[in-house]
Amino acid sequence: MGLLADVERIPEMPLDNDLIKAKAKSSAIAIITIVRNSGEQYDRTIVNDFYLGLDELALIKNVSAAFHAENKKVIVILNIGGVIETASWKNNVDAILLAWQPGQEGGNSVTDVLSGIVNPSGKLPMTFPIDYNHHASANY
């Protein structure tokens, strides 16, 4: 396991680099959403849940390269129910917004943050470890 292990989940739709570059020219900003399902019906797994998949890492890398080449910003919105690994890709983007799993009004609350209507000044209830093995419960 580790940062380069691919995940067993439905992969992201691959985006052609020409499409990404065209969107970078025509869009003011890039917004990438990373999602993790969460619930009481199953436990989180290290590879499928904590680490991003190779497809997600490629998406962040390719979108960031194209938008930064146009001097435009890239924001990642995390719609997650628990911590994930961010250390390997956080420097590729300009901002990370942790939405948690905000429910049916999530779109409105995220829009309020992105538009500057509200300040996302909440304190995180947990630490985001650099690696899964840095988490206190990694041995259980």
Image: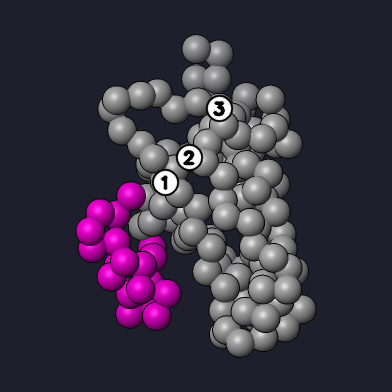
Q: CA distance from mark 2 to mark 1?
A: 7 Å
Residue farthest toward the top in the current orientation of the protein: 140
To which quarter of the image does residue 108 belong?
A: bottom left
Judge whether 5 appears above or below 125 on screen. above
Q: CA distance from mark 1 to mark 3?
A: 14 Å
Q: Which residue is tagged 1?
A: 80
Return the x and y of residue 90 as percentages of the image width and height: 65, 55
In the picture, measured across the screen, residue 107 lies left or right of residue 74, that is: left
Pointer 2 and pointer 1: residues touching (CB < 8 Å)? yes
Going by the numbered disc 2, the residue's amino acid type is Val
Q: Which residue is tagged 3?
A: 46
- What stretch of residues is rendered in magenta? 101-121
Q: Which residue is tagged 2?
A: 83
Return the x and y of residue 135 as percentages of the image width and height: 55, 27
What residue appears at the point 71 percent right and 59 percent down from the top-left corner? 61
What residue appears at the point 50 percent right and 52 percent down from the top-left corner? 34
